[in-house]
Image (cartoon, rainbow, N blue to C red):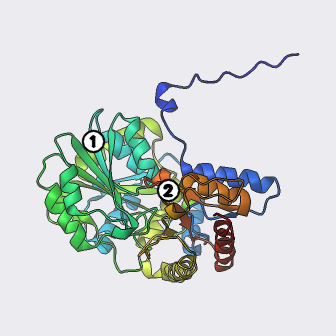
Amino acid sequence: MQQTQSKTGNVSHLLSQLNESATLAMARLSRELAAQGHPIVSLSLGEPDFNTPDFIKDAAKNAIDNNVTHYPPVNGIPEVRKAIAAKFKRDNGLDYSPEQIVISTGAKQAIANTIYALVNPGDEVIMPSPFWVSYAEMVRLVGGIPVMLAATVDQDFKITAKQLEQAINEKTKLIIYSSPCNPTGSVYSREELEAFARVIEQKEELYVISDEIYEHINFSGRTASIASIGNMIDRTITVNGVSKAFAMTGWRIGFIGAPKWIADACNKMQGQITSGANSIAQMATKAAMEADPEVIQPMIDTFRKRRDLVYDLLKEIPGIKLNKPEGAFYFFPDVSSYFGKTDGEHTINDATDLSMYLLRTQHVALVTGDAFGDANCIRISYATSEETLKEAIRRIAAGLAQLK
């Protein structure tokens, strides 16, 4: 019997305009090569290599034993929202009531909810570039226009208040940034955020998504929240979660603190898409929120040690330009000096070519910087062991040395 050929090209126009997440695409490709027997070293995903702390797992087990297994409220279990509000006050100096908290299935959904709630077709959304891969795609999904403000490695990948002021116009509705930043590891100081706030407050109906998911992985001190400056709490949606600092990526819990009308809008949006986030994971999140952040300091210290190791190794490779990131667990080196070079078989035209060259020839999985808004760079995650990092960078150096 002849098999019917599957149809192609019939997805919606909306979906056809959406790019696949570059980080997930590289992870998928590296898994496929590994399954074929290639010794892949992956530095592509932003996932801590630690296990979730036992006290958090115990809270989840207790939730199961106590039958916290029914539908939760869409915006989250009240006692968990209360714990998150207390965390915002303790760690960030932010006064959010539990009614201003919405718990979602990961910080990614929290950001998407907010963009859907605020952005109309034709609205412009400013994002300092480099930026996290999904910001621009989410904006495009709702018909918004991403406006990228470029900052190079020479600026520590941080835009200035002057750049921001020059980009704002009558169509600007929203600004999205992360600090500590994925993919660069750069951290905005309180003084830099104060300068942004003075610019933002000049325009009515302009809002900010402050993505603080890497808040605790900050080697320069406490992360500054723009919502704590002046009247910015009325303009800011503060996004956070438990995946990075508490090694809870698979638990899929993120949340926002926001003006109540925005929280209500996100609650409405979420109610039609996923309803409430996993009830057991929420109770685990409550334990994480109530814990002293000092409990995760050993993990942060390990990340700092790895940061220093990778910095020392990368700066020895000719032609690479890099900053020394103050947070998260990424490097975002400028590799443009290798563009136009070849090993006789592969010609490197851009960062995507270089990423694929290193994957195919050295079996190291990285992510092209083009996906993050800077085609001169590649992203390297150092959320893995020192031995793996040493081997990966040895391979990278060997591969780059073949390009002439």
Q: Quadrant of the C terminus?
A: bottom right
Taking 1 as reference, is 19 left or right? left
Picture residue at 30% right of the left edge, 32% below the top: 121
User: Disc 1 vs disc 2: Cβ atoms closer than 8 Å?
Assistant: no
Q: Quadrant of residue 248?
A: bottom right
Residue at the image position 20 percent from the left and 54 percent from the top: 235
Residue 134 visible from this viewpoint:
yes
Q: Which mark is residue 124?
A: 1
Give residue 74's position: percent from left, percent from top. Answer: 41, 45
Which is nearer the eye, 251 or 361? Answer: 361
SS class, disc 1 = strand
Q: CA distance from mark 1 to mark 2?
A: 23 Å
Residue 194 location, x and y as percent? 19, 68
Which amino acid does the dot numbered 1 rest on?
A: Glu
Instruction: Please give the residue where the numbered disc 2 appears in the rendered image.
Output: 369
Question: How many marks can you see?
Answer: 2
Taking 103 as reference, is 338 above or below it? below
| Disc 2 secondary structure class | helix
In front of the other: 85 or 372: 372
Q: Residue at x 52, y 82 (%)?
A: 308
Give the residue displayed 47% in from the left and 71% down from the top. 321
Can you give x and y, in whole percent of width and height, for residue 160 in the image?
Answer: 24, 63
First reached walking from the N terminus: tag 1 or tag 2: 1
Q: Is residue 109 visible?
A: no
Q: Quick check: 186 above or below 147?
A: below
Mark 2: amino acid = Gly
* Residue that extends furthest to the right in the rendered view of this protein: 1
Camera-near label (1 vs 2) is: 2
Question: Looking at the picture, how far across and down is residue 327, in whole percent?
Answer: 43, 73
Q: In the image as oriented, which residue stretches furthest toward the left?
A: 202
Whether residue 277 sits left or right of residue 156 in the image: it is: right
